[in-house]
Amino acid sequence: MNLLGKILTGAIAIAAIMLLIVSMMVYSTHKNWKTTADKLKNQLSEAQNQNQKLQSRYNSLDSRLKAEVEAAQQDVRKLESERVQLIAQGSILQKQLDGLLKEQRMNNAAVASTQANNEELTKEVANLRMALRENQQKRDEAFATTIKATDQLHQAKGRLDALVERNGQLTQEVAMKSSLLRENGFDPTATPGEVVPRVRGLVSALRRDASGQMIEVTVGADDGLRKGHTIEIFRGQRYLGRAEIIRTEPDRAVGRVIRKFQQGPIQENDHVATKLRVG
């Protein structure tokens, strides 16, 4: 029995109790039982009518409720079927999700491996770039060195060509001078110290020290004078003396006047010549 039936039964019970109470009250007050009974009968009739109405309404509501329950059960069965389908779909989706998660883990591992590989490649590229810059710098330095060496080689070749040419000229000049020396009675194979060159110059300065009178002349090592050579000093046709060379420089020399050969005072701009000078 549903709630509506219980309500109707309760209502009937309450009505019966009320009728009982009323009857007792009628009895206690000695009223007209017939009138009371008619009244109660009418009330009962009304109550029965009301009960019938309520029963009819109950039946209607019960039918409606059963229909709704049946519809609800159908909905439940439909929802259950859908639930089963959703569970099956959920199982399939779970499998797909598991597969995707597995694939994601594999992809994450692949990405991590790729990142590590990229980092190694980045380091290797950085090292290669550094090595490339160093090699380029070394190549540039080597190229510059090559250019410099090539330039030096060209310069050296030019100097060599010039020296070869000069050597040929000097060879010809030596041959001519050797021939000239032989014609004048000199041995061209003699060492420079063995031959006193024929040179002539002037007295450029005079001074005295503890060893005697010193003169400076305008001829020197470039003219062939060496330490120990002697030079004759004269002014015009007058012979003034002899000096021994004690120090030479490329363009001048210093000599000490030998006293035993001195025949007059020596002055600046007096002429000097080696002892082999003729005239």
Image: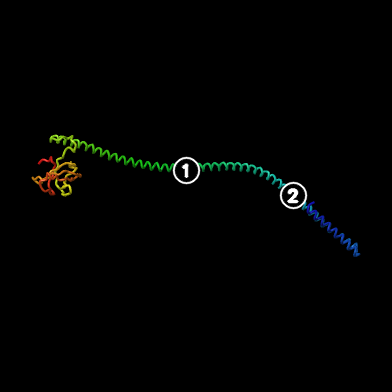
Residue matched to label 2: 69
Image spot of residue 172 (x, y percent): 18, 35
The image's colour scheme reads rainbow
Residue in the picture at 27% in, 39% down:
156
Q: Distance between the residues labelled 2 and 1?
A: 75 Å
Query: Within the image, what quadrant is residue 276 found in?
Result: top left
Mark 2 burial class by Cα count in 10 Å: few <14, some 14-19, many 20+: some
State whether residue 40 is above or below residue 68: below
State whether residue 62 is above or below residue 188: below
Residue in the picture at 57% in, 42% down:
105
Image spot of residue 77 (x, y percent): 71, 45
Residue in the picture at 40% in, 42% down:
134
Mark 2 residue element: helix
Residue in the picture at 22% in, 37% down:
167
Query: Within the image, what quadrant is residue 145 found in?
Result: top left
* Residue 44 in view (yes/no): no
Q: Going by the image, does 195 lie left or right of 93? A: left
Q: Which amino acid does label 1 sit on?
A: Lys
Image spot of residue 233 (x, y percent): 12, 45
| Sequence-wise first label, 2 or 1 | 2
Image spot of residue 26 (x, y percent): 89, 63
Residue matched to label 1: 123
Q: Going by the image, does 186 lie left or right of 93? A: left
* Residue 6 in view (yes/no): yes
Which-is-in-front pick, marks 2 and 1?
A: 1
Between 275 and 19, which is closer to the camera in this rendering? 275
